[in-house]
Amino acid sequence: MSAMANAGETNIGKGVAILLTATAVFGIQDVLTKIVVQNYSVFQVVMIRYWAFALFSVWLVMRRGPIRNAFVSAAPRWQLARGVLLVADIWLFTEALRTLALGDLAAITMTYPLMVTLFAIPLLGERVGPFRAGAVVAGFIGALVILRPGFVTIEIGVIYGLLSSAAFALYLVFTRKVATLDSTTTSIFYVGIVGLVMTTAVGVFHWEPMRFEDMLTVMGLCVTMCTAHGLVMASMRYAPASVLQPFNYFALPWAITLGFLVFGTMIEGFALLGALIIVVAGLTVMWRERHMVARARLSAGAPTRPST
């Protein structure tokens, strides 16, 4: 992903601004999702969402060359697994939206960067030193502050949120694995097509006729989803992914703000404290990984900054 920034104009401020806009649009997407799943099956809503995403991914692929080239993969099993994991993540996250406030769910899902660090050890053979290990432990202490097992009843939405984070973390680890084997075009194509087939195979059995106003809400959901993904890709034309990644945490204040403005919900104090601990731990892990990559490049004689 950093190569996208290197290949074009490097403008860190512009890249960050675009990504922050994307996090806001993702927040609006979650608001629309929460509204529509109160009346319709999660499987139906996610199916329609994937219809739009599949069209979006095919459009992206066709812009980069013949679509038949996207079928060719050096790691088809890993690509299929990525597609399945992302569908599972979206199903679980959408189900969690039924009952959890936006801010509370956002706080819980902030654990995914820490899970990526853990999953990368057995799956990618990465070594985690005491510095990053301590940050991961601190992050999961933050999760315990949010959940407070034994003091509050953990509802099913919280479990769905944690499982969603785990599925997304595995998806990211698998994405790292295929990044050196397949092109970005192939990875996008497989995610879109696998998701289309999987969600449709389940969603058609949960179809209910939709009211006109609900159809408009779902259309808004699809538009915001495609817009947000497009903005994320645009942001990486101007800044490396390693620089942009920490700003994904701005999804939390957006979720808290939109949850209050639209639904009148406030994030609970312990959830906010736990989320802040998780965010600091996640930023620490990202900083350490970036520092290690820069040091490795320096020792190899490679530049530590993207070329301008």
Image (cartoon, rainbow, N blue to C red):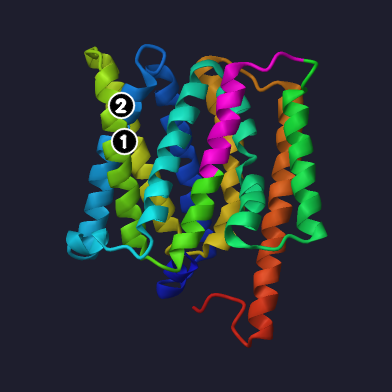
**Badge number at residue 248:** none
Q: Which residues are magenta?
A: 152-168
**Badge number at residue 202:** 2
Residue 301, placed above or below residue 121: below
Q: Quadrant of residue 224?
A: top left
What residue is shown with label 1? Answer: 198
Q: Is residue 48 visible?
A: no
The residue that appears at 28% across and 49% down in the rendered structure is 57
Q: Are marks 2 and 1 in contact (CB under 8 Å)?
A: yes
Residue 98 image point, x, y percent: 49, 17
Tell how many labels.
2
Residue 303 image point, x, y percent: 59, 82
Main secondary structure found in the magenta portion = helix
Residue 193 image point, x, y percent: 27, 45
Q: Quadrant of residue 25?
A: top left
Q: Is residue 153 magenta?
A: yes
Circle 2 packing at 10 Å, graded few (<14), some (14-19), many (20+), is: some
Q: Is residue 232 magenta?
A: no
The residue that appears at 69% across and 84% down in the rendered structure is 299
Amino acid identity at mark 1: Met
Residue 109, placed above or below residue 118: above
The residue that appears at 35% across and 43% down in the rendered structure is 227
Q: CA distance from mark 2 to mark 1?
A: 7 Å
Residue 194 image point, x, y percent: 31, 44
